[in-house]
Image (spheres, grey):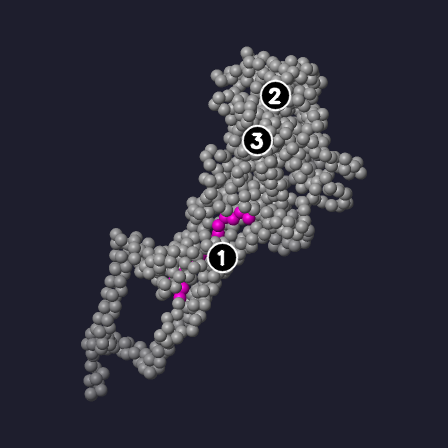
Amino acid sequence: MKPANWSRYLIISGICLLVIVGIIVQMVRIQNLPGSEIILAQSESLSGTTQIIYPDRGKIYDRWGHLLAGDETTYEIGIDLNQVSDPETIATVCASVLGLDYSTVLGYARTKAGDNGQYYIVLDNFVDSEKVEQLSILQTQYAEMPVKRHVVNPSLSGLMWSPYTKRSYPEGSLASNVIGFYGFLDRIDGRGFFGVEETYNDLLAGTPQTVYVAYDPQRVKANMDLPEGASLVLTIDREIQSMAENTLEEAIDWSGAEAGTILVYNPEDGSLLAMATTPRLDPNEYWNYGEVFPNPTPFNRAISKSYEPGSVFKVITLAAALDAGAVTPETTFYDPGYIEVGGYYINNWDGSAWGTQDMTGCMQHSLNVCLSWIAQQLGADQFYEYVRAFGFDRNTGIDLSGEIHWPIRVPGDEQWYEVDLATNSFGQGIAVTPLQMVMAVGALANEGKMMLPHVVKSMVIDGHQYEINPVVVGTPIKAETASTITELLANSLENESSNALVEGYRVAGKTGTAEIPTQYGYSSSQTHTSFVGWGPVDDPKFLVYVWLEKPEISIWGSEVAAPVFQDVVEKLVVLLGLPPDSVRRELVAE
Amino acid sequence: MADHAVQNFVLPKEYCKSRDKKEKMKKPKQLLQAYRQAPWRVQLQWLGFFLLGVVLVAAVAGVYLNLSARASSAGRAIQSLENKVDAYQREINDLSTRLAYISSSEQMYLRLKDTDLALLDPKQAIYIEVPGFISSPDIVLAPPAEVASVQTPVIKSQYTNSLWDWFVENIWFAYEKPSVDLTEVEE
């Protein structure tokens, strides 16, 4: 039997069913509306947001772990317009603490939330922690002030600050030519410029991750562990770099040189212990780049400026000739004071005739005539073969951005003339970078093996440290040749009583004085003075290259660059903990 | 006579069928009525079932609320902890950078001047042999990349296998083991 009110139940159930069906139909309809995607996107935007998380940029250390480039916290100051209750106080505090313009801040603080779609206005960026601490104290003090009737308390409600990291270089301009700088002012697209900051930009930057950050606490997930960018350990020794930079500054002041470069290199593995050049930029204030490096000043002259090296190149010519057997150390040459090559006469640096000289004498007196003759004995084809083998026709491949090389002219080229063989033999008419010279001469100090110059010693990637192995890029000469020329150059320095000699340490080396080509020909009044030397002769541990451009005190490398080499090596041996030769031999003998 | 008349009275066939059917229907109804519970009991049962349903729904809702509340709380805790981690990381970075600045080459040189110390004159350096002294080792910021190595177990598997493991390994899959070429081993 049906209950008496069955029909009522049916009616109510029908209504409920209709409502449910209506709701379902409406849900399906809304889901399929043309604007449904917009509604969906709006709902998604209200439930969370997608953020790109940038990992901390990798740090840069010197070879002993001293931080050269790291991160520090800085703040963005802004106003949340929905929260502002006291614009005048915000403007007053921002003006006094942050040094912002009072009326500008007041104008921002009085902006109605939502006007022009604005809910948040950035007032300042890169504000340091101390200032934010002051703001924080003031905000707390105002918030804790007792509420009194008819008295409106000041408030910094709405004033916000959010932290982020910026690149910091604790050593200032030290080794900045090697490090480069990071354009941190651009918080989204910042990247490294010059040096290792540019070369290893992708590694240092790491891989950004896109994550969904839910506002709904139930959907919150822990962010995945984002490994920071790779950290780099440089081969640069901070103390040696500092010493080289200070010595260079002193040398420039003393000599009146326009600019300079000092390289300290380990010929055994190709690592650079110091790379000091001028000018230098404090990468913490990289926006001064234009002032520090007026066009066309290179950021790092050691790799980005080629020049005619002059007599330091003679070591390459003699090494090639000795290696090819064109001459021996005992070979003698009668120097009449000139030599005719391809219709041109080549003279010595002093224009005089030096008579009969062996190879040591030729190097000791830096005789252009003798070296031209040696190059002729070697022959043009072989000479340029050796020049190529020493790497002068290409970049060295150092892990620094901005390296250049000047193409060499060889027989067969339209612009090559017979006289070029002679001039090239003593370093004129051929342009090299200081680093090319260092790499090539390094072979003489390393048993003929030429190493790839590098400034990165190891990398820390994903929690593991990877050492960079030394790379042999060539063996332009035999080990015996390297030993012979090292001995020969050490003797020539000793015979000459060179300003480069270092008490207690036997070193080999060669001075260089190069005339500078101008549009009117070579200038004798302005020169490039240089010195390349290595030691200790029996077991070379360092190679030092000094280049001073256009010194005023003297035009000669022997008077300007050689004493600077001596100065550098005297300090270098202490920093390297390298005892004098006699002490070292005693220790080895024991 | 009357009895006889009654005895001799034969009911029509259709009537008898109908009566039998009613009789048959009457019996179950009687049974049903015999065991039917009192209406107040039925109502009480319905009320009980309803309340049980309500309690079940309330229990499920309670569990759900509890879980969702805990999930929310954990979510907030995660956010808070991540913010703390970020803050600590920034602090570490700040302190490292500050330490690097304080001990920077320039600052150390200024401190050296303040304390009336001077750089060593290389010519005055005295070198002595210190047995066992090792010059500064290379900086290690992280362990080197590990080379995958297979550890030799200290205890043989025969001592740790269960009977089942042994059976599976040595009987069941015995035929899958590669045979050892004795001649090759001998060589």
- Residue shown at 56% from the left, 41% from the top: A175
Q: Residue furthest front?
A: A553
Label 2 vs label 3, nearer the camera: 3
The residue at which mark 1 appears reads as A129
Q: Residues within 10 Å of mark 1 (few under 14, many from 20)?
A: some
Q: Amino acid at mark 3?
A: Glu
Asked if labels 1 and 3 touch by Cβ distance under 8 angstroms, the answer is no
Element on which disc 1 rests: helix
- Residue shown at 51% from the left, 42% from the top: A281
Residue A573 at x, y percent in the picture: 68, 38
Q: Which mark is residue A349?
A: 2
Q: Amino acid at mark 2?
A: Trp
Residue B37 at x, y percent in the picture: 34, 81
The residue at which mark 3 appears reads as A552
Let me know if residue A585 is in the magenta part: no
Image quadrant holding the C terminus of chain A, namely top right
Q: Nearer the viewer, residue A318 or B106?
A: B106
Magenta range:
A155-170
Mark 3 and mark 1: span between their CA atoms? 48 Å
Q: Residues within 10 Å of mark 2 (few under 14, many from 20)?
A: some
Q: Nearer the viewer, residue A413 or A553?
A: A553
| Depicted A135 relative to depicted A245: above or below | below
Same subunit: marks 2 and 3:
yes
Same subunit: marks 1 and 2:
yes
Mark 2 and mark 3: span between their CA atoms? 18 Å
N-terminal of the two: label 2 or label 3? Answer: 2
